[in-house]
Image (spheres, grey):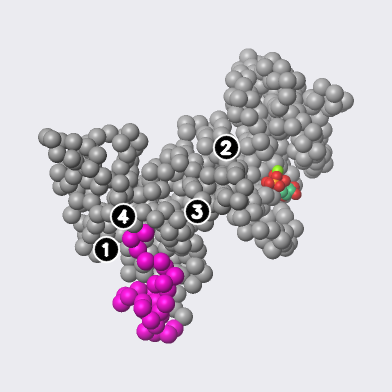
Amino acid sequence: MSEIDLFYGKEGPTPKQVLFRDAPEKYKLFGGGVGGGKSRALCAEAIRLSMLFPGNRGFMGRNESEAFRKTTLITLLALVAEIEEISGQKLIAKQGWNQTKKEIDLINGSKILYGGLSGPDADERIKSLEIGFYCVDEASECNEDVINMLKARIRWKLPTGKYPRFFGLYASNPEPGWLKQTFVVPTQLGNPLDEHLFVQSLLKDNQYLPPGYLDDLKRDNPESWVRRYVEGSWDAVEGQVWPDFDHSTHVFPNLSSDLEIPPPPKGTYRQFAAIDHGQTNPTCFLAFYVDNDDNIFVYDEYYQKGLVSSHCYNIMSRFDVTSFDYILADPSMWGKNREKEGRAWSVWDEYDEYDIYLEKAQNDKAAGWNRVGEYLRVDPDHIHPITGKQGSPRLFISARCVSLLSEIPEYVWKKIKERNSNPKEEARKLNDHACDALRYGVMSRPSPYDLKREDIAPVGSFNYFRQQTRSNTKKGYMVNV
Ligand SMILES: Nc1ncnc2c1ncn2[C@@H]1O[C@H](COP(=O)(O)OP(=O)(O)OP(=O)(O)O)[C@@H](O)[C@H]1O
Ligand SMILES: [Mg+2]
């Protein structure tokens, strides 16, 4: 008896498809770059759930009916034919495929309904469905409301009176929207929703693609396309202030690495902090350190609404503020726009009263955006301080900094409609408190491209080491040892 799961065809599933298949969560997203085997996995699961539970009923669809017919339906029928051929058994009942009703009856009494998920007809159809599972391909195209409606239709009872295992399955390329917010962002932040699983699908995980396919895509497409559709980056959003930001490069731990960015050992590295104070908005405090190779690590954050007194109390209990060389803040905090006992009083005075001494940040926004961008950029010559590999950015953020990490990918340029205006003039003013604090902190460090010159390499840095030995030894400074 062969070990191969024939529902995935004669070669069986890829390891990522196995992960997707075996996870017990009710809602599962197989999402990522092109050609990862997502559509095939959805089709295999639809067939498997139909065959596993005789008399089951499932729905397969895509936002537009026609797009489904031309893509996923073809994959489904080809897979059915392949399984029929290797098993020598029919799966589809005699005259079981009704193209008008968009239904496929299987030999064991199960039925797969299929079609589009948009338009009034689709709405009516979905409202009257009763199903045991659904599979939505390119799910990010769909409206979240229609998906919520589908979820509510999962209640099919088998002819035996028992319920099948219920599943809501999705496949998608990395696109912004509800799907990303529901599956990807919570997983990236280490806190997936209950009964939700995100499996990242990458082209390189699919061994069934033609040789050279990956290289051709990389060669023939622009870099941002490659980042999103080949490398499967969910962070590549149109118009980002920091397009180089990528979870698996800048954040530790991440979906594929357990390595941590620990708080700095006492007295080792230069430490500093930055605060963006909000009157009614949240206040964000970020703690940084810099290693001998001028890599910047943001190792923790405080992010909350409230009064200065409670911010100060919380910051002091979370951090040893005496370990910071300086704490930077928005210069507007020095404005004496408050009054206390008849005296003009600033927010700075208030922090000072609670023994948090703040210094003025350099608040040139354009320069700050640019500097953060420089630190996020991957320099092919730089050694990664955490993995030790060559080719690395110089800014790293701990997964503890949940608010900062949710703000960065959403931090996009405001679209300015008027003619002759530079569209990159202003970042959109929406939840940018942590991004502002990041900008203050990073702006206190020199441009990495000035630092890169070997003749000014600081003692103990990688460049210093390279300068001393003139060898090609590729070893960075490990934060994790
Ligand atoms: N388990 C498998 N066995 C054999 N071939 C497979 C398997 N999984 C995927 N493939 C093949 O790999 C190719 C890509 O698979 P598929 O179309 O499912 O990818 P996808 O992730 O949906 O791609 P896209 O992002 O373009 O929609 C197809 O030719 C498919 O038949
Ligand atoms: Mg597909």
Q: Are marks 1 and 3 in contact (CB under 8 Å)?
A: no
Whether residue 191 sits left or right of residue 4 in the image: it is: left
Q: Residue at x 63, y 29 (%)?
A: 143
Q: Residue at x 56, y 44 (%)?
A: 415
Q: What is the number of the mark on residue 242?
A: 3
Whether residue 398 sits left or right of residue 341 in the image: it is: right
**In the rendered image of this protein, does residue 433 appear above or below residue 263?**
above
Residue 7 in the image: state x and y as whole percent. 71, 39
The three-letter amino acid code for the residue at tag 4 is Ala
**SS class, disc 2:** loop
* Number of the front mark, 1 or 3: 3
The answer to whether any part of residue 82 appears in the image is yes
Q: CA distance from mark 1 to mark 4?
A: 17 Å
The answer to whether any part of residue 202 appears in the image is no
**SS class, disc 4:** loop
Of residues 127 and 395, the one drawn nearer to the viewer in this rendering: 395
Q: Earlier in the sequence, mark 4 or mark 3?
A: 3
Q: Which residue is mark 4?
A: 361
The three-letter amino acid code for the residue at tag 1 is Arg
The three-letter amino acid code for the residue at tag 2 is Gly
Q: Which residue is mark 1?
A: 270
Residue 79 in the image: state x and y as whole percent. 77, 40
Which residue range is magenta in the image? 443-471
